[in-house]
Image (cartoon, rainbow, N blue to C red):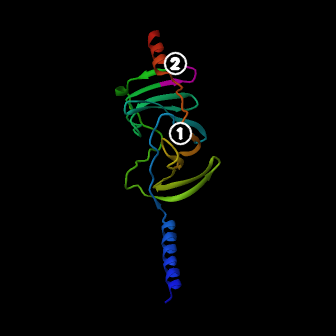
Amino acid sequence: MTRSNNLLRCGFYVLTLLLLEGCNTNVKYKPVKWETGQWVCYSINGEPFKISIVSKDSDMFWVETEEPEIIIKMLIKENEFNTPQKIIARKLGGKAINFETDKISIKCGLPLISIDDSLKAIRKVITLPTGKFKTAYLKKEDSEVWLSNLVPILGIVKYKSKDKNIEIQSYGLKGAKSQIDSTKEASELFEMN
């Protein structure tokens, strides 16, 4: 066998390995680390919803969710939406109210994806009105989720279940601002009582 044949054969094996690696459909998803200023706007069943990280307090984050009628501000550890340390809420046009977290039970209505080393998903490209995303796609029982390691906070690009349809509208890694001045608005409320 000549030297050129050996090089061609070697090149063919390398090309085959590269193609096989590129066809691997399993992909690991790694979420964006939380930072102050991140925000994401979604459409949830046709209604607007925004989630923002507006500040950091030690190892916890002040996260705000905005819906058409209410803004909720929670002090939580990264990805621990169901265990807030503090909650402040304000209805549209109203004053902020401080809630004692030990007297209420919180259940986040958002699909929270548990991220660990065993999470393996299928690589899928999804095109939405907001753009094209390379995603990690997971299907569990009656729900499907498309996650992107470019989208902050929840990582969700799209989510479908029998009762919930979520699609990303826009997002950013900087620029989130609080809609509740917790200190000022909460203290004004308590002074009135």
List the residue tagged with mark 1.
Answer: 173
Q: Residue at x 55, y 45 (%)?
A: 166
Q: Residue at x 48, y 55 (%)?
A: 138
139 is within the stretch colored magenta: no
Q: CA distance from mark 1 to mark 2?
A: 29 Å
Confirm or deny contact between disc 1 and disc 2 (CB under 8 A): no
Q: Which residues are magenta?
A: 89-95
Q: How many marks?
A: 2
Is 186 above or below relative to 71?
Answer: above
Is 38 above or below relative to 120?
Answer: above
Split into 4 quadrants, where in the image is the C terminus? top left
Residue with the most extreme bottom position: 1
What's the amino acid at mark 1? Leu
User: x and y percent of residue 100 in the render?
Assistant: 38, 24
Report the front residue among 124 and 189. 124
Residue with the most extreme top position: 192
- Per the rendering, the mark at residue 22 is none
- Per the rendering, the mark at residue 95 is 2
Q: Residue at x 47, y 21 (%)?
A: 182
